[in-house]
Amino acid sequence: MDKHFEISLQNRKFLYSILKNTPKDVLCAIPSGFKNNIWWNIGHTVTVQQGLLYGLSDLPYTMNMELAKKFKKGTVPEEVPEDSEIEAMKKLLFDTVEKAQADYAAGKFKKYSSYETSANVTLNTIEEAIIFNGFHEGIHLGTVLALLKAVQHPKPV
C-alpha cells in the first residue's frame, strides 16, 4: 500500500502548491457552472480521506471535526476561510496522509464497515478504501484545475 500513499502525497503536493500560491479571492470564487470553489475541493479531499479510512474503520478522525464538517459530502462553501484555517489545511494536506500511512503500517485499521460510494463502488476493506481515495482525490484535483482556469480566464456570458 506504500505506493498508494506515495501517490496520495504527490497529489497533495499539487494541492498544497495551489493553496499556497493562489490569492484567497481566487480560492473562494465560484465561477458560473460550478457549485463550489477551490478551497472547498481541497478541504473536501482531506475530509473524505478521513471518513473513508478512519470513519468507516470506527476510528476518530485525525483532524478537527468542526473543520471537517465544512467539507463533507453534500456541503457547499458557506464562508471565506480565516487565514488560520488555510494554514491549518496546508499542514493537514500532508499530516493526514502521513498519519494514515503510519496507522496502516501499525495495523490500526482492524475493522471496516462496507460502504457504497457515489461512484457505485463498494468498499469492503481498508485497502479498497485507500485505493479508492486516490481515485477520489484525482477527481477533485481535476476539478481544482478546472476551477483555477475558469476563475483566471472566465468566458464571456
Image: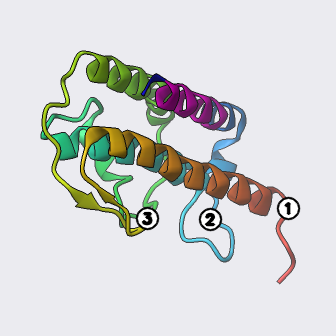
Quadrant of image for the C terminus: bottom right
Which class describes the residues within 10 Å of circle 1: few (<14), some (14-19), or many (20+)? few
* Residue 9 part of the magenta segment: yes
Find residue 153 and name its label: 1
Nearer to me, 72 or 28: 72
Residue 74, placed above or below residue 72: below
Residue closest to the far bottom: 157
Q: Which residue is mark 2?
A: 30
Which class describes the residues within 10 Å of circle 3: few (<14), some (14-19), or many (20+)? some
Nearer to me, 111 or 60: 111
Nearer to me, 27 or 95: 95
Location of residue 125 in the rendering, given as x and y in whole percent from the top left corner: 25, 44
* Residue 91 part of the magenta segment: no
Start-end of magenta stretch? 3-15
Camera sees residue 36 = yes
Residue name at image x 27 percent, y 34 percent: 64
Q: In the image, what residue type sits under mark 1? A: His
Residue name at image x 20 percent, y 46 percent: 56
Q: In the image, what residue type sits under mark 2? A: Ile
- Secondary structure, mark 3, is loop
Quadrant of image for the N terminus: top left
On the image, which quarter does residue 119 sit in?
A: bottom left
